[in-house]
């Protein structure tokens, strides 16, 4: 695939993630998430919630080389409120100096998630059929919502309350579940914008894995999205999940690198250190 096509698809993955994070501002829960959606960056922070699932900077843009002072200024809401933070960037598409400045102020690369894309026009997935006792559904009832939330929170090792904003309370997301032997054992969410459907939070309980449940649930959700006008599917994946998504037809188009505070900056963010007044950042 030509490099320009890969870049276009990688940016589509990033844009859908941006829409997903920005949608946290729609959630009617206290404390409300603050969304600064600007031409320079997307910044989401949730005062009083010390959970990186609800605090992030991404899509940073600058026509000039980025300085440590600029990155610290962007992080000011987190420093002032003593919040954790993630900083995501599309590797190779970030402005000059950003990675170096993040490192100078005490952020560390946590590695990256592979960005994947799948054109849905004429998509005919080749995947083993589900077992007859499996049921796939777009979640509708409150009981189903809570069951799917429990699965996703357990698999991703996160507290149910912050994850609830991504799965149950956010009106921009659709929530799907797989039921096996009468019990919800898998879940995922989708967000559709401008003909692109992003797939998120794909999770299967340990005792139900290796049965094709997650793959068939993704197929079910993408077929619904296609009927609703989606032409491209996007997601990010860990190395362990790449084989599954490759079987479904997804192809790697880039890497979204995730940065988190190193030990020194983490101490500043949790209030263990007073803010420095000089220009030494480490």
Image (cartoon, rainbow, N blue to C red):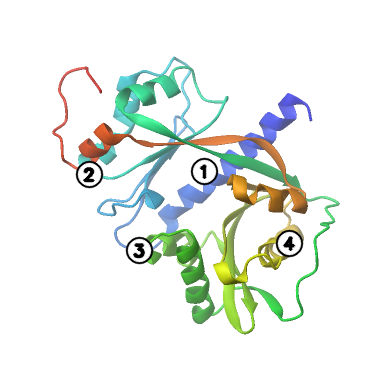
Label 1 vs 4, first from the N-terminus: 1
Marks 1 and 4 in Cβ contact (< 8 Å): no
Q: CA distance from mark 2 to mark 4?
A: 41 Å
Nearer to us: label 1 or label 4: 4
Label 1 vs 2, first from the N-terminus: 1
Q: CA distance from mark 1 to mark 4?
A: 23 Å
Q: Using the image, tell me which numbered label, if any, was put on residue 81.
A: 2
Picture quarter with the N terminus:
top right
Q: Using the image, tell me which numbered label, if any, was put on residue 18.
A: 1
Return the residue at label 3.
29
State the residue at coordinates (51%, 69%). Answer: 151
* Callout 4: SS: helix
Label 2 vs 4, first from the N-terminus: 2
**x then y, percent, for residue 231:** 75, 49
Q: CA distance from mark 3 to mark 2?
A: 19 Å
Picture quarter with the C terminus:
top left
State the residue at coordinates (80%, 64%). Answer: 128
* Callout 2: SS: helix
Q: In the rendered image, which quarter is residue 5 located in?
A: top right
Specify few, some or many for label 3: CA neighbours under 10 Å numbering under 14, 14-19, or 20 or more: few
């Amino acid at each position: 695939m030509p490099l320009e096509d890969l870049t276009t698809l990688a940016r589509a993955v990033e844009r859908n993630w941006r829409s997903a994070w920005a949608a946290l501002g729609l959630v009617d829960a206290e404390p409300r998430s603050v969304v600064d959606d600007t031409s320079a960056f997307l910044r989401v922070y949730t005062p009083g919630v010390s959970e990186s699932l609800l605090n992030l900077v991404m899509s940073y843009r600058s026509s000039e080389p980025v300085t440590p002072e600029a990155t610290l200024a962007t992080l000011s809401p987190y420093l002032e409120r003593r919040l954790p933070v993630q900083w995501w960037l599309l590797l190779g598409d970030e402005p000059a100096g950003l990675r170096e400045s993040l490192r100078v102020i005490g952020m560390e690369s946590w590695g990256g998630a592979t960005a994947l894309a799948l054109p849905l026009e004429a998509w005919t997935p080749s995947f083993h059929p589900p077992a007859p006792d499996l049921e796939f559904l777009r979640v509708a009832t409150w009981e189903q919502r809570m069951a799917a939330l429990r699965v996703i929170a357990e698999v991703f090792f996160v507290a149910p309350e912050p994850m609830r904003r991504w799965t149950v309370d956010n009106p921009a997301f659709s929530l799907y579940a797989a039921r096996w032997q009468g019990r919800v054992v898998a879940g995922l969410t989708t967000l559709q914008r401008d003909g692109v459907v992003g797939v998120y939070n794909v999770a299967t309980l340990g005792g139900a894995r290796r049965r094709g449940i997650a793959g068939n649930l993704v197929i079910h959700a993408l077929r619904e999205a296609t009927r609703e006008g989606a032409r491209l599917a996007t997601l990010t994946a860990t190395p362990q999940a790449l084989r599954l998504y490759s079987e479904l037809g997804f192809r790697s188009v880039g890497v979204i690198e995730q940065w988190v505070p190193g030990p020194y900056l983490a101490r500043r963010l949790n209030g263990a250190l007073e803010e420095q007044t000089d220009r030494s950042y480490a």
